[in-house]
Image: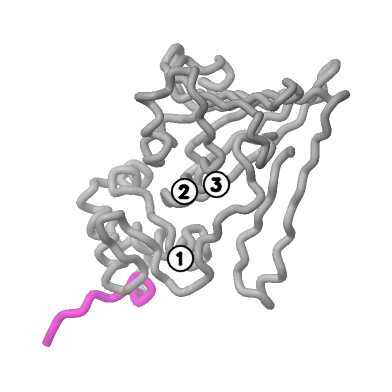
Amino acid sequence: MARSTPTPAARSTPDADRPLYWRIAATLLEELRDGTIPPGRRLPGERRLAEHFGASRETVRQALQVLRHSGAVTTDRRGTHAALPGEPVRTPSALAFPVGARTGVEADRATVAWETPPPGHAEALGLAPHRPTLVHRYEAAGGLRTAVTSFSAVALAEVEELGRYRDRADGRGSAQLRRAYDWMRQAGLTLHHRDSIVPLADSVRVTRRVHDQYARPLEITDLLLDAEQDALVYEFTLPADGSRAGRPSPTASGPR
């Protein structure tokens, strides 16, 4: 008789008695079921999962094999993706990058440079002093709002589209990264952002910090807005009741 591999849910023994790979599989399965990792989203790579769980890559590989056997994930040349039935990953339609960016305004300018980020950014991203990273600068036409974004080493390693900019980030050519948040989500990252607003003498500063489902920093943006000449608008979408409409993904937009 062929030997079958039970799923984590089929085990009744206490967690402490289970092998580490099984506990990792159970944790990932819970994230798949509660929507933390939505259907179709790519899971972090084996190396990242090994670092997160404090295990070897072989142990993580065993955990993923358990999930593959149960049909919870699938693996192809693009990586391992969530496969449980449910609502697919949605493309964010309102959360613009960077915070404060105006959509559809061709006169606005954006560039990227490989350089040392502002001191406050380096600390927020966990970067060593004077260590360079990808820095994005945005300026609206007329100079009424400017934004500076610094990306973490995690973001550059996990998001292929961002990593490609390193060799051509000379600070001169145009570099519109409007789809940065889409790229992060497609790389299997769940985005959590916190925006703080500080009124200044004649302007407003908005600071956005974004981290992933493992509390790893991804980016930090400082937006300066001329409070007398420009408007700051926040728009939010409240999802339908989950008991009546499944598990919708909330969307929110920052300052526009």
The secondary element bearing badge 1 is classed as loop
Q: Nearer the viewer, residue 215 or 100?
A: 100
The span shown in magenta is: 1-11
Label 3 vs label 2: CA separation?
Answer: 6 Å
Kindly identify which numbered label has been placed on residue 62.
Answer: none
Q: Which residue is mark 3?
A: 191
Q: Nearer the viewer, residue 129 or 164?
A: 164
Quadrant where the image shows the N terminus: bottom left
Residue 147 magenta-drawn?
Answer: no
Q: Quadrant of residue 131?
A: top left
The secondary element bearing badge 2 is classed as loop
| Magenta highlight: main SS | loop
For the residues labelled 3 and 2, say whether their Cβ atoms are less than 8 Å apart: yes
Q: Give the percent coordinates (x, y) of residue 161.
A: 40, 39
Instruction: Find the residue positioned furthest to the front.
Output: 106
Q: Nearer the viewer, residue 224 or 122?
A: 224
Q: Is 128 located above or below residue 52 in the figure? A: above
Q: Say few, some or many: other residues with alpha carbon within 10 Å of mark 2 (under 14 / 14 to 19 / 20 or more).
A: many
Kindly identify which numbered label has been placed on residue 189.
Answer: 2
Label 3 vs label 1: CA separation?
Answer: 16 Å
Instruction: Find the residue positioned furthest to the top.
Output: 130
First-in-chain label (1 vs 2): 1
First-in-chain label (3 vs 1): 1
Q: Say few, some or many: other residues with alpha carbon within 10 Å of mark 1 (under 14 / 14 to 19 / 20 or more).
A: many
- Amino acid type for the residue under numbered disc 2: Leu
Q: Residue at the spot x=27%, y=53% of the render?
A: 60
Q: Residue at the spot x=60%, y=24% of the render?
A: 148
The secondary element bearing badge 3 is classed as loop
Instruction: Find the residue positioned furthest to the left.
Output: 1
- Amino acid type for the residue under numbered disc 3: Leu
Q: Which residue is mark 1?
A: 39
